[in-house]
Amino acid sequence: MLVTVINYGSGNLRSAAKALEKANKDNNLKYNIQISSDPKLINKSDKIVLPGQGSFKDCKEGLSKITGLIEELNDHVLVKKKPIFGICVGMQLFATYGLEEKKTDGFNWIKGKVKKINIKDSKFKLPHMGWNEIELVGSNKYFSGIKDLDHMYFIHSYEFEPEEAQTIKAYASYNKKIVVAIEKNNIFGTQFHPEKSQDSGLKILGNFLKI
Amino acid sequence: MLKNRIIPCLDVKNGRVVKGINFLELKDAGDPVEQATFYDKSGADEICFLDITATHEERAIIIETVKKTADKCFVPLTVGGGVRTIEDIRKLLIAGADKVSINTAAVKDPLFIKQASQKFGSQCIVVAVDAKKTSNNKWEIFTHGGREKTGIDAIEFTKKSVFNGAGEILLTSMDKDGTKTGYDLDLLKIITKSIQVPVIASGGAGTLEHLFEGLKIGGASAVLAASIFHYGKFTIQQAKEYLASKDVQVRIK
């Protein structure tokens, strides 16, 4: 069984891969975890993790630069309907479009847009950076073992606004409620970094491996 | 609600901790990975490595240190010291650092911050501002670990850094650093009010009350401390319980 962490020149892939390895071991699973941008390997993957750091536009451009990558990701998600986990900007890329720097199309797997968190009160800093509690919406297999108001680590200035409310699986309270986890069929993503959220984050990655 | 962060800082030289925890239970007090793991388990919200390696040739060692730490610690890691080029940042991020702190290079070339934040995103670019008071309500920037005077106004420099894309400011008072008499609250207040990005208070923490002051009076989002944790005076847990008792929002496991 193969899990591929998509490497498209963005951010801290090593942490994501190492956290998956730890979750794999903790749960006595037998996944092979790879970091790759090779469409052939993605084609053979059972599960995909899409990390993302930097701007929506740069991440999308990074993905587009690798021949055949976007096609293979669409095939994995929409045709084969296999699991994908998006982290931070990786999750934001699921949207119809993002407004960071300029309007850029996302995968449109989960309808919605990504826009800057609108801060009017100067006591709220931006980026939204640090540990915040997540407020769970309904029950969800990815959050098995996670309690309402468990802390997760965030570092972002943009938020996902999905069109369909039923895709929202968790919020965090900041200047207002921010959507921090979304799910639709085989597609799941978090705005926070499970790979940096100590035991709670490892639990979520373990749940992803177990499904 | 977003919590205030407590960040222990470890000074690392040639891959060994030179200013860190000095507890008997550590097998090898010089091992950065062991120290980081200790703080990770004791509830640190982030960990900061300051690389004080003297020569350029030896800088590759910090990359190995970061790699080994990222293999074991699933907590955010900031690395600073000697970061001068886009390539330096890339290597640290790939090794597993989440944020990179830039000091001298940001002062020498303000456009470096712009390039770095455009390339990797503001979220991972921390500008380390080392400030020294020169007269009433006036502070000046120092570089090279506080040894060189620049004549640059600290408040203006900080604002410009944020404008250029810094996602966080690590503000150290050179006057207070090492004194254990508390943070420079006047400086903190002015800086936190002038910018929208989070500020980490650094330099001067000697008691738990100092942490409280930095967060509540100074308006910092996080406090960096070294000696009060390293020498076992207080644990991170004690610090958090104290802060919570004074109505400061902190993450308690």
Image: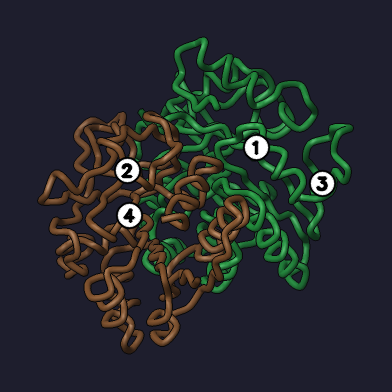
Residues at marks 2 and 1 on the same chain: no
Q: In this structure image, what is the colour of chain A?
A: brown
Tell me which chain the residue with mark 2 is part of. Answer: A
User: Callout 1: helix, strand or loop?
Assistant: strand
Indicate the amino acid at tag 4.
Gly
Mark 4 closeness class: few <14, some 14–19, many ≥20 residues within 10 Å? many
Judging by the rendered image, the residue that carries numbered circle 1 is: B8
Kindly identify the residue that appears in the image at 14 percent across and 56 percent down. A112
> Dividing the image into 4 quarters, which one contains the N terminus of chain B?
top left
Colour approach in the figure: by chain
Spot occupied by residue B240 in the image (x, y as percentages of width and height)? 57, 21
Comparing labels 4 and 3, the label whose residue is closer to the camera: 4
Indicate the amino acid at tag 2.
Asn
Judging by the rendered image, the residue that carries numbered circle 4 is: A189
Judging by the rendered image, the residue that carries numbered circle 3 is: B18
Judging by the rendered image, the residue that carries numbered circle 2 is: A140
User: What distance separates the C-alpha of mark 2 from that of mark 1?
Assistant: 35 Å
**In front: A32, or A49?**
A32
